[in-house]
Image (cartoon, rainbow, N blue to C red):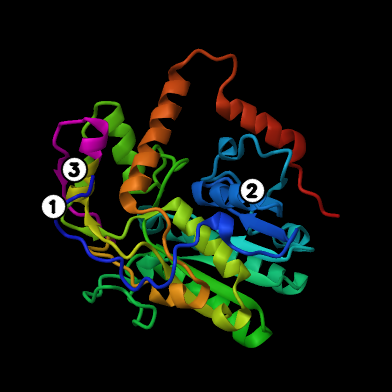
Amino acid sequence: MSPAGLRSGPVGTLGPIRPADTIPTRRMSTYLVTGAAGFIGSAIVRALLERGQRVRALDNFKTGKAQNLEGLWDEIEFHEADLNDFELVASICAGSDVVLHQAAIPSVPKSIADPLTSHRANIDGTMHMLLAARDAGVRRFIYAASSSAYGNTPTLPKREDMKPNPISPYAVQKLAGELYAASFHRVYGMETVALRYFNVFGPRQDPTSQYSGVLSKFITMMLQGQAPTIFGDGEQSRDFTYVENVVQANLLASAAPAENVAGRMFNVATGVRLTLNQVYAALQAITGFDEEPKYETDRVGDVKHSLADISSAAQAFGYRPSVPFEEGLRRTVEWYKTQMAESSAPSGSSRGEIGVARRDRIGAPSNA
């Protein structure tokens, strides 16, 4: 299945595909993953454990879910903590080799409705993590940045040397985090790397959350026989990026030579763009749902078109997406189908209850 119409790329890809399990790494480093119970953070945690790394996981469960870490509680050192508790964050960071900072309130609408809360999580929280990592002597700090920093500039594809033009408070906040990361490299010599994610999707993305991306909502509604809503005419386009590609980029950036990556920012995407109408048609083919979508007026703060040039990441640390959009979409639909089937089956206790109970038993923060 290959959606027809507007499509290009992949843009700027170089070198062979490098799946995450072939990426070289230092043995038994300690990785601290913030936002570890989110769908991206939990995917990174799993990949690190599969590669034999020691993992510290931090989350406050404001947007993350305990069940995203189900089956991993005995393998990780988990801390339930808020990034704005600096003393606690500093104690957790001590002894870490690499910080993978995924924690955020990742929502344009939320940042518009409540910019102060969003600011505290996305800017103040990031500053606390940078300070804690600096004081702990962390080897490398990977920051989850956002393609929203480019705004509505008409030039495609988006390149890292373009002037940023953020629209929403969220975009401003994520750009500020990038600039702080670069500053900490220049001023304190920290090996900081910012990765600008483009429209990440995949398993464990919560479709009921106001923060979730469009694909998780589309998929679950269509599987339930409901027509999703598209804001605008559906011709807005995105460089949709399967979560495994984002995990791969984080692992590669963590292991790359400092001279290639330190103090820099890189696009993480596929170099292919699709309109929402094309994505909807692709999902109809996979799910068998035959109703048309509902259309409503554009949302304030949304970007019209997005497409990444990923050649800088390819050159600096060998990134090339290993999972194309169509395959990622199929995997994601199958995951949601499985989850919906399991949730409808009789059970003694829910998956979420099991996860929370496990977290309460082993997850008390350690200040040692």
Residue at image mark 1:
233
Q: Is residue 145 above or below residue 69?
A: below
Q: Is residue 132 above or below residue 338?
A: below
Q: In this orientation, does residue 143 appear?
A: yes
Q: What residue type is disc 1 on?
A: Asp
Magenta span includes 285: yes
Q: Residue 222's spot in the image, x, y percent?
A: 26, 32
Quadrant showing the C terminus:
bottom right
Magenta span includes 334: no
Q: Earlier in the sequence, mark 2 or mark 1?
A: 2
Residue at screen point 54% across, 48% down = 43
Residue at image mark 3:
281
Instruction: Specify whether 170 is left or right of 89.
Output: left
Q: Residue 228's spot in the image, x, y percent?
A: 23, 37
Q: What residue type is disc 3 on?
A: Ala
Residue at image mark 2:
50
- CA gap between label 3 and label 2 equals 35 Å
Residue at screen point 22% across, 49% down = 2
Q: Earlier in the sequence, mark 1 or mark 3?
A: 1
**Which residues make up the magenta segment?**
283-301
